[in-house]
Amino acid sequence: IQASGGDVTITNDGATILKQMQVLHPAAKMLVELSKAQDVEAGDGTTSVVVIAGSFLNAAQNLLNKGIHPTTISESFQRCASKAVDILEGMSSPLQLSDRESLLKSATTSLNSKVVSQYSNILSPLCVDAVLKVINPADDSNVDLRDIRLVQKLGGTVEDTELVEGLVLNQSAAGNTKRVEKAKIGLIQFCISPPKTDMDNQVIVSDYTQMDRVLREERQYILNIVKQIKKVGCNVLLIQKSILRDAVSDLALHFLDKMKIAVVKDIEREEIEFICKTLGCKPIASLDHFTA
């Protein structure tokens, strides 16, 4: 499937295919939403539910053509659905989240209908172990998939896929400090760079002494921020991406590097919630709130 932007998707997953379709008919939109709901709830059977629902719609059309009232048809479908649930519950087998072998079989069965079916022996254990890492099998009955993050990297093969118990960032360390043990991490949403004037104001420098003063003020401004960060014992700093100015200036990186503080900049806003939940920290929007 080729999207309008040129992106190409190769899949046999029903929900993925339907998401790419530009449908207009209300019944078709209903089938797309049905497939999405099935994908969220069960993660499999997205094509099957559309085929079954399409068959029901066809049968309903035939009944309408015979003059049967829509309310009667709707009530009949409801009764059939209730009976189907009873039958399925009778056929089902209880499954404990602590039973890893049964979970592996279920994951392998689901992957057998996907494009990556030949790699199910690799991906199934990764999927099951990822789920078991984010829940308590003894108490939890549901899984919040937002607690599991997929990081895509170019190059390599499916065999290179691995499960990391921790946090993986797409960004690399900005300074020379690449490795920190016993890390004390801070996640900030403010910039460590000289503030800029707004669009309606300008700063006019008429001679080199004024320019020198501006540079000294900027240097002192950045140094005060870095000293405050170091004062609370932070040795790993994550900085949210800014669209207004540089999240961290070269001078700030120099000071942070001298103080042995590792820096990862340009963290996307959408990643903040996941990072905070994973690390057990809170985002800091102002230097005044940067405390131990």
Image (spheres, rainbow, N blue to C red):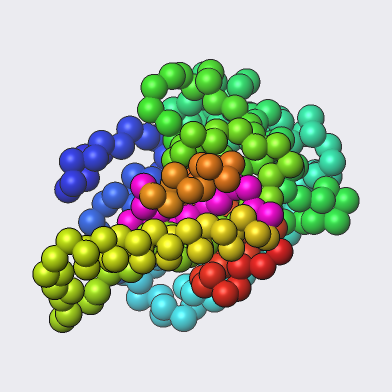
Position of 27 with respect to 73 (left or right) is left
The picture places residue 115, in percent across and down from the top left corner, at 44, 28
The picture places residue 245, in percent across and down from the top left corner, at 30, 61
In the picture, residue 153 is in which quadrant?
top left
Say whether residue 92 is magenta. Answer: no
In the picture, residue 29 is in which quadrant?
bottom left
Which is the main secondary structure of the residues drawn in magenta?
Answer: loop
In the picture, residue 68 is in which quadrant?
bottom left
Identify the residue at image location x=53%, y=52%: 238
Identify the residue at image location x=72%, y=48%: 134
From this view, report whether residue 63 is shown above or below residue 227: below
Magenta residue span = 233-250
Quadrant placement of the C terminus: bottom right
**Relative to the observer, which residue lies in front, 142 or 63?**
142
Identify the residue at image location x=58%, y=54%: 275
Whether residue 98 can be seen here: yes
Position of 44 with respect to 144 (left or right) is left
Identify the residue at image location x=26%, y=52%: 21
